[in-house]
């Protein structure tokens, strides 16, 4: 057996889902008995059969990947419940196996996959989609680039309305159907306290969480996931702010961004200039703008 | 023989793996440590806390990069994005050498994120050595390959594991990161004498040595890096040091990680053997 063929043969078995009792399946990917599939390329020894030796790798693969998904999507896990979450992850990883050298990117397609496979998101599909998107944005914001911050002199002399501003790569702009920021922060707070909790407290915590999720009412929110001193924060913004920032990120002019913001706005005309001034002041203070890095695309 | 072309002619002492649970201790207490080994992939990002921490570490400590996903033994070409990011990190850390495992883990662009064992064939040795050369030429730093722990052997193998290691490093003209714990684990899983392995490695190519603990199960041993180093592994280490000389040594502790002091104290036990190797050289 040549190297590539052997690697394909072994990878197919290693990446095949485990049984409910977390053992290797008795049937191989090609439909044959796994015992003969394994024996074809793996030697037995005096303690383990070929099947058992292959099973070590099969189990490690799934334990490692499920552990990574659990670490990255604790909110999705809380809403779905542990069993449903594990089953969902197995289905996701079968459809979207890792194509990156780093486990960091393992969940990059989770939200889009859940959108296309609604049954795995359960009864509260939109809520699960929202949380999956927020948790992925959290990962992106954590280690995305921070470019040199914009200085006054970088925009000195630029035409007012024709000005184009660039957002820091780590700034993530998101709109949600549910107030998932509050939910996720509450879950994280509870998890921080978990280490000191008794079993009875842990049971109460789980029940409380299920109730909190069940009670959660839809509410459109606009959120920026960003960083301050290398820690990730969630900041709610108004719909108009979201519109300005979204248009700026598209590389369009300040004038177009502001026009887009107030197209359907309920902010009184007389208050708009002050609002815009305040927003930009806040964003600049938070360091969301960076120096121009390359030629801007035309609007 | 401490400094050689495979570790950038450095003479590093005893290091430990840089782990997140110890960041606060290291950055606030600034303990004296010869060097830290980082998992390259944890820092191959564009920004944020990982690089901020790394830069602070680099201000005070020597750092060597150790990778877990280059997969020298995979039958496919190296991933260009992986190489590009790795080279960026090499420039940042100024690591004197880069290490990764003598294993495979990806096929047809799909990653298992595991260190899967090689079939010990001449074809695999040739492919692996070619890839090691490509990576070294791209990174422009010496490369050392690490022997892995394994739980399976293949019918197609044409040689022993140590013969395969020798075949690869000679063809690639690269260094060895000799993991004596991995040798022990594999020797128990595959019924060979670990000392034969240590005695068969070309000592002049050993750039670095890994020591670690493991977990023993009823029918096999798993390389878990969650325990102190056991005596039989120290014996292999002693022999390796006797053959290779005073070599950069690194303790791996990746799970159930105890306090910084406990990890460092465990690593410093290697001093006993390193000191005797210096004496042996002197007389």
Image: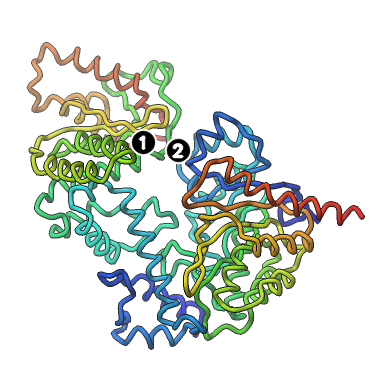
Write down the chain letter for disc 2: B
| Picture quarter with the C terminus of chain B | bottom right
Write down the chain letter for disc 1: A
| Picture quarter with the N terminus of chain B | bottom right
Figure check: A232 above or below B113: above
Residue A243's x, y, as percent? 19, 30
Residue A114's x, y, as percent? 19, 55
Residue B175 visible in the displayed image = no
Q: What mark, if any, has residue A170 been given in the picture?
A: 1
Which residue was labeled with disc 2?
Answer: B47
Of residues A141 and A135, the one drawn nearer to the viewer in this rendering: A135
Q: What mark, if any, has residue B104 been given in the picture?
A: none
Contact, CB < 8 Å: mark 1 with mark 2? yes
Residue B194's x, y, as percent? 66, 72
**Image quadrant assignment for residue B232:** bottom right
- Looking at the rendered structure, whether the residues under marks 1 and 2 are on a common chain is answered as no
Mark 1 falls on what kind of element? Answer: loop
Q: How is the image coloured?
A: rainbow
Of residues B165 and B94, the one drawn nearer to the viewer in this rendering: B165
Figure check: B97 above or below A216: below
Query: Does residue B266 appear left or right of residue A201 in this picture?
Result: right
Query: Does residue B206 appear left or right of residue B133 in this picture?
Result: right
**Image quadrant assignment for residue B193:** bottom right
Query: Does residue B210 appear left or right of residue B3 in this picture?
Result: left
Of residues A60 and A252, the one drawn nearer to the viewer in this rendering: A60
Of residues B215 and B22, the one drawn nearer to the viewer in this rendering: B215
Mark 2 residue crowding within 10 angstroms, few (<14) / some (14–19) / many (20+)? some
Alpha-carbon distance for marks 1 and 2? Answer: 9 Å
Residue A296 visible in the displayed image = yes
Figure check: A47 above or below A22: below
């Amino acid at each position: 057996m040549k190297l590539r063929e052997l690697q394909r043969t072994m990878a197919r078995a290693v990446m095949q889902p485990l049984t409910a009792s977390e053992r290797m399946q008795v049937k191989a990917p090609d439909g044959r008995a796994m015992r003969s599939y394994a024996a074809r390329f793996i030697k037995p020894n005096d303690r383990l059969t070929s099947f058992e030796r292959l099973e070590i790798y099969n189990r490690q693969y799934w334990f490692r990947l499920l552990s990574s998904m659990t670490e990255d999507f604790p909110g999705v896990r809380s809403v779905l419940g542990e069993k449903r979450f594990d089953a969902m992850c197995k289905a996701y990883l079968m459809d979207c196996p890792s194509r990156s050298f780093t486990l960091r990117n393992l969940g990059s397609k989770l939200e889009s996959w859940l959108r296309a496979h609604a049954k795995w998101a359960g009864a509260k599909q939109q809520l699960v989609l929202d949380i999956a998107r927020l948790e992925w944005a959290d990962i992106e914001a954590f280690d995305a680039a921070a470019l040199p911050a914009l200085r006054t002199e970088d925009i000195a002399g630029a035409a007012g309305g024709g000005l184009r501003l660039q957002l820091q790569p780590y700034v993530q702009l998101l709109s949600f159907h549910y107030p998932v920021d509050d939910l996720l922060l509450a879950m994280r707070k509870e998890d921080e306290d978990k280490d000191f909790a008794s079993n009875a407290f842990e049971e109460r915590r789980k029940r409380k969480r299920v109730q909190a999720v069940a009670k959660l009412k839809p509410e459109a929110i606009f959120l920026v996931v960003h960083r301050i001193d290398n820690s990730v924060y969630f900041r709610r913004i108004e719909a108009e702010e979201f519109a300005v920032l979204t248009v700026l990120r598209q590389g369009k002019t300040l004038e177009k961004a502001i026009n887009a913001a107030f197209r359907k706005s309920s902010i009184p005309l007389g208050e708009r200039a002050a609002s815009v001034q305040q927003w930009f002041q806040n964003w600049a203070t938070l360091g969301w703008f960076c120096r121009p890095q390359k030629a801007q695309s035309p609007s | 023989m401490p400094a050689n072309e495979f570790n950038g002619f450095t003479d590093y002492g005893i290091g430990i793996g840089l782990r997140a649970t110890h960041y606060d201790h290291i950055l606030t207490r600034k303990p004296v440590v010869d060097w830290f080994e980082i998992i390259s992939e944890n820092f191959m990002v564009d920004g944020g806390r990982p690089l901020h921490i790394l830069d602070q570490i680099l201000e005070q400590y020597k750092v060597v990069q150790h990778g877990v996903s280059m997969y020298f033994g995979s039958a496919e070409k190296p991933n260009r994005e992986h190489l590009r990011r790795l080279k960026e990190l090499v420039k940042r850390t100024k690591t004197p050498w880069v290490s990764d495992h003598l294993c495979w883990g990806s096929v047809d662009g799909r990653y298992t994120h595991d260190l899967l064992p090689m079939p010990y064939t001449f074809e695999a040795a040739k492919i692996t050595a070619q890839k090691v050369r490509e990576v070294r030429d791209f990174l422009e730093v010496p490369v050392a390959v690490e022997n892995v722990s394994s739980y399976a052997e293949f019918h197609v193998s044409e040689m022993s594991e140590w013969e395969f290691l020798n075949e690869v490093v000679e063809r690639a003209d690269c260094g060895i990161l000799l993991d004596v714990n991995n040798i022990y684990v594999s020797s128990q899983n595959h019924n060979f004498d670990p000392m034969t392995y240590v005695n068969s490695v070309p000592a002049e190519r050993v750039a670095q040595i890994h020591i670690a603990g493991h977990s023993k199960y009823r029918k096999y041993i798993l390389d878990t890096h969650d325990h102190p180093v056991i005596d039989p592994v120290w014996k292999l280490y002693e022999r390796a040091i006797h053959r290779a000389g005073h070599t950069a040594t690194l303790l791996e502790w990746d799970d159930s990680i105890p306090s910084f002091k406990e990890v460092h104290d465990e690593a410093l036990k290697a001093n006993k053997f390193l000191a005797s190797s210096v004496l042996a050289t002197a007389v």
